[in-house]
Amino acid sequence: MKSNQTENNLPEPTKAELEILQVLWEFGPSTVRFVNDKLNELREVNYTSTLKQMQILTEKGILKRDESQMKHIYIPVEAEEKTKDQLLDRFVNTLYKGSASKLMMQLLGNEKTSKKEIEEIKRLLDSMN
Amino acid sequence: MKSNQTENNLPEPTKAELEILQVLWEFGPSTVRFVNDKLNELREVNYTSTLKQMQILTEKGILKRDESQMKHIYIPVEAEEKTKDQLLDRFVNTLYKGSASKLMMQLLGNEKTSKKEIEEIKRLLDSMN
DNA sequence: TTAAAGGTACGACAAATTTCGTACGATACA
DNA sequence: TGTATCGTACGAAATTTGTCGTACCTTTAA
């Protein structure tokens, strides 16, 4: 048996799970039906597939749900920022040995990062002082 | 059938594949034995498992190999920077809707990013003007 | 009061990824 | 020259992840 846990003991969200989290982050606590509809704007997914995923996410402790009504309402346990922090952390560690500035360099060297974005970042840093 | 391709048509490296790439990036072209030994410093892996992975990576066109000797030498096809660019790009798009500055904010808000790192980033930006 | 619509539960299947056993060829050297 | 060692090839098992069919419950409205 292999356990796939982050340092604070939350299982790593998979790709499909992340898709669901994104919807919940964007639109707040939602029903399976709502999430499934959103997903279907991007690709075809069966309702029960989404349902199953959300049930698994609940088992894993990534989502919790309000069962007081027939239409269960699902809610992320951790705040968006916190989960993203974990993912970012893992990403930086994996690819850049934990060096944020290395990641930055990559980002700045990347042609996809626009001048406008760079200005934005500069402003951000200056305002931190 | 589901194809998992990046925009420039390279299959996405999986987790285990990434581990192998890291070793090759760090130590340069290597034999399976060498890579396997490195991996085993982190976790137990069977030699033939690593071999198989590297063969798959070669089939996918992510690695190429020099078969002129009995001990084949494996080499990444794309430069480290390029592959990381792709991964970073995907990461930013997935989690931050493509906004590099949003990622930055997350990075700066993250307690794991040290003051020293932040200074480093500032210097970097200033030197870009 | 029943049929349709919409909900959950859950086992089973499918696909992708990872790991490994076994076969067998090369090399080294006692 | 034979046997231990080290290499590759490759099918298949194991695991993880993703999808779906079916059963069955609840609500709604004719």
Image (spheres, coloured by chain):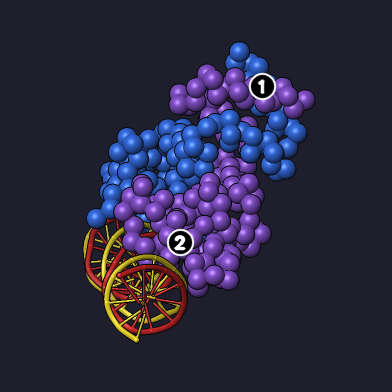
Chain colours: A purple, B blue, C yellow, D red
Q: Is residue A13 visible?
A: no
From what the image shows, is residue A98 above or below residue C27?
above
In the image, what residue occupies the spot 47% across and 42% down? Answer: B94
Identify the amino acid type marked 2.
Val
Q: Residue at x 37, y 66 (%)?
A: A48
Q: Quadrant of the C terminus of chain A?
A: top right
Give the image location of residue B62, x and y in percent: 34, 43
Residues A103 and B22: in front is A103
Q: Secondary structure at mark 1?
A: helix
Q: Is residue A91 above or below residue A65?
A: above
Indicate left or right for D12 with B104 as reference: left
Q: Nearer the viewer, residue B79 or A102?
A: A102
Residue underneath mark 1: A123
- Residues B97 and A34: in front is A34
| Callout 2 secondary element | helix
Q: Residue furthest right?
A: A129
Q: Does the image show residue A9?
A: yes
Left or right: B14, with A121 as reference point? left
Image x and y of residue A113, in percent: 50, 25
The residue identified by callout 2 is A32
